[in-house]
Amino acid sequence: MAVTVTEMLKMSQAQLDDLFTQSPVGEIPKGEAKGTAIVAPGTTYTQDIANFINHFAWQGKIFDPAKGVLRNKILPFGLNAIIAKVYKAPSWLDNKECIVLDYSETSLLAHWVRDEIREIAPHIYLGKVYLGKKRLIDFALEFPASG
């Protein structure tokens, strides 16, 4: 079942967790993805918060699988910063394979952050953000269909 970002913004936390645990890991993506933060899932505020974050703080990620890294697009002008190592490893949520976005050795700012993603539909990934071992928020990555 293909799920869109708009549909994910309407899901509860339990539904997002089920979607993540039932999805295959997928391939490590390549290129630029539009990011959508999923904060307060299942509430009427989710879309507004996502729009605010997307406009002022975080727009997405740019993956370079050949180098095994990504860069985040941040701030209103799309600065490419905050690098992470990208590799496959067991998820902290369900211990099944996922794609890990690891900032521990590449970023002073995001040193304690670990993201995990899985492909939930063609060109669409659902992510989980951890600060230390505490789960914070979810996010979606949407890649252009051609890339």
Image (cartoon, rainbow, N blue to C red):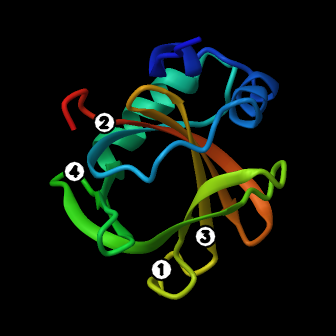
> Residue tagged by mark 3?
113
Mark sitting on residue 20: none
Say left or right for 1 vs 64: right
Name which residue type carries label 4: Pro
What element does badge 3 sit on?
strand
- Decide which of 122, 49 is in the foreground and name it: 122
Q: Secondary structure at mark 1?
A: loop
The quarter of the picture where residue 72 lies is bottom left
Does residue 107 sit above or below 40 in this rendering? below
**Alpha-carbon neighbours of circle 2 within 10 Å: few (<14), some, or many (≥20)?**
many
Q: Is residue 9 visible?
A: no
Q: Earlier in the sequence, mark 1 or mark 4?
A: 4
Q: Are marks 4 and 2 in contact (CB under 8 Å)?
A: no
- Contact (CB < 8 A) between labels 1 and 2? no
Q: Which residue is mark 1?
A: 109
Number of numbered discs visible in the structure rendering: 4
Q: Nearer the viewer, mark 4 or mark 2?
A: 2
What residue lies at 52% left-to-right and 88% top-to-bottom?
Answer: 105
Task: State the residue at coordinates (74%, 56%).
Answer: 91
| Label 2 SS | loop
Quarter of image, res 138:
top right
Query: Which quadrant of the figure has residue 16?
Result: top right
Q: Position of residue 10 (x, y in %)?
A: 61, 14
Per the image, the residue denoted by label 4 is 76
Circle 3 crowding by C-alpha within 10 Å: few under 14, some 14–19, many from 20: many
Q: Name the mark nearer the viewer: 3 or 1.
A: 3
Report the amino acid beneath label 3: Val
What's the amino acid at mark 2?
A: Phe
